[in-house]
Amino acid sequence: MTDHLLGIHHSAFRCRDAEETRAFYEDTLGLPVAAALAFEEEPGSGKPHPYVHIFFRLPDGNFIAFFDAPDSAKPEHFRPAHGFDRHIAFEAGSVEALAQWKARLDAYGIPFFGPIDHHFVQSIYMWDPNGLQVEITARTAGHDTILQAEEANARAVLAEWTVRTAAAKAGLKA
């Protein structure tokens, strides 16, 4: 296939306050603001809906982005989400770098937990000011070997899981 996806350009989330979000992602995590675009209308509909769309540049050239749209924001948008529901994982350069991230988060007074050893990665977790769980993860020495073995078995695991959970999911599709 010649027309294939190249990667993720950006993931976007709602934020409570653009400046508070900027401080967390730029000052604490070190991701520079790449753009802050203010608009008066909702894209596609043309309905009045003032918002700012901010982008933070990741070292690989991709972005994480946020919408600050106070006219449509509700308190429930910012309740801390369970990691199964919504989280973003940033990659540190090494397990040693992960320890440096722990020290940095401590210095900024950011509560976190971990590291959690997932065998192929080790991770620390926190919440950003918007209730989004943020993970900083580092590949372990066995990362590639473990994932290669898991890839070989992935379809069988998914097929078994589909059968095992079919009854529980029947009510979710209503």
Image (tube, rainbow, N blue to C red):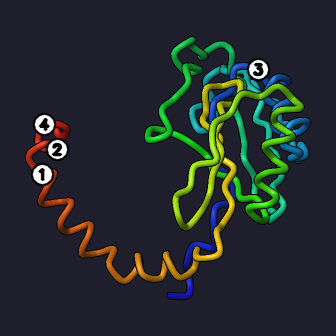
- What percent of the width, then of the height, locates residue 59? 84, 61
**Which residue position is annotated with label 1?**
166
Q: Gap in Å between the C-alphas at discs 3 and 1?
A: 41 Å
Cβ atoms under marks 4 and 1 closer than 8 Å: no
Q: Nearer the viewer, residue 89 or 13?
A: 89
Compare residues 31 and 42 and report the one nearer the observer. Answer: 31
Question: 87 or 34: nearer the eye?
Answer: 87
Contact, CB < 8 Å: mark 1 with mark 2? yes
Q: Give the CA separation, mark 2 to mark 3.
A: 37 Å
Label 3 or label 1, whichever lies nearer to me, is: 1
CB within 8 Å, label 2 to label 4: yes
Please state if 112 lies on the left or on the right of 161 as rendered. Answer: right
Q: Which numbered disc covers residue 169?
A: 2
* Residue 23, position as x, y percentages in the image: 87, 29
Q: Dot 3 lies on which element?
A: loop
Place of residue 118 in the rendered image (x, y in percent of width and height, measured from the top left): 52, 58
Of residue 174 and residue 91, the one placed in the foreground of this image is 91
> Which residue lies under the disc numbered 3?
17
Q: Residues within 10 Å of mark 3 (few under 14, many from 20)?
A: some
C-alpha span from label 2 to label 4: 5 Å
Alpha-carbon neighbours of circle 1 within 10 Å: few (<14), some, or many (≥20)? few
The quarter holding residue 62 reads: bottom right
Mark closer to the chain start, 3 or 4: 3
Q: Residue at x 55, y 24 (%)?
A: 80
- Relative to residue 118, is residue 68 drawn left or right? right
Q: Amino acid at mark 3?
A: Asp
Which amino acid, mark 4? Gly
